[in-house]
Image (tube, rainbow, N blue to C red):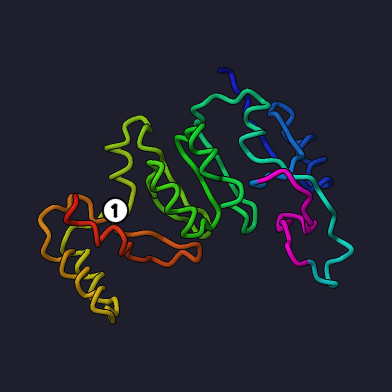
Amino acid sequence: FRSKGILVEPDPEQFKKLKILRTRAITSNKLIYDTNTNLNFLRDGELSKVVTAPTTEHKNNIITIESIPLIELLNYHNSPRIIDFFSLDVEGSEEKVLTEDVLNQYIFLSLCIERPNLKLHELLTKKNYVFIKSNLYDYFYIHRDFFNYEKFGRSYGIKLNKKQFVSLLKKIDFGSLECKKCYKKLVYSDKIKHYSDFLYYDRDNILFFDFNKIKNINKI
């Protein structure tokens, strides 16, 4: 498709720098959100973000910007339906940008997202994205359609054998009866191929067990 890529920066001052430094790319100063609306935007350099409850402390640095959904931006620029790479860093509004509507129409073969919350992580998993690794605040995913996924995805993701997985489980406080049942399923099931499928990182880079998937082990 000879796509040049699209770079988005809603902060007017930062956008001026973007236009100077990235002359070969398509640039946009749109504010991306899940709806078309007017939002309060805090101008704070690299930490600029949408604010729902502005404080008097920042009142001089807040501007109002009209937002558009990501899908509208991609459609406007005739983006290919399969996109090689997507990077998302919007200081806490990630799930408002990468919505289910977008993921229904576009496939991103690889993604880098700053601190995705659990809701976004679960949406990505539902849409055939696989968590690969994290580096400080950035989380990397690939789509199962990624070329050579079976080798690449399993080699660089969270890779644990049963012994290592059980060792992790022993460090968890299984307080409720329901959690204890989950523990037994994990330890005694012979249907599990990839133990990493039952792990995820939250936006604070803490490793958790996905109990919803564990409950459904018998359905595998």
Question: What's the residue at 27%, 76% (across, down)?
Answer: 171
Residue 19, image x, y percentages: 78, 35
Q: Callout 1: 10 Å neighbours few (<14), some, many (20+)? A: some
Q: Which residues are magenta?
A: 35-53
Relative to 121, 192 lies left or right:
left
Location of residue 216 (image quadrant): bottom left
Q: Which is nearer the eye, 25 or 101?
A: 101
Q: Which is nearer the eye, 121 or 163?
A: 121
Residue 51 falls inside the magenta stretch: yes
Residue carrying label 1: 197
Residue 45, image x, y percentages: 76, 55
Relative to 13, 107 lies left or right:
left
Residue lying at the far right in this picture: please name it.
Answer: 60
Residue 91, image x, y percentages: 64, 57
Tag 1's secondary structure?
Answer: helix
Residue 119 against residue 15 in the figure, above or below: below
Location of residue 47 (image quadrant): bottom right
Question: What's the residue at 33%, 62% (across, down)?
Answer: 210
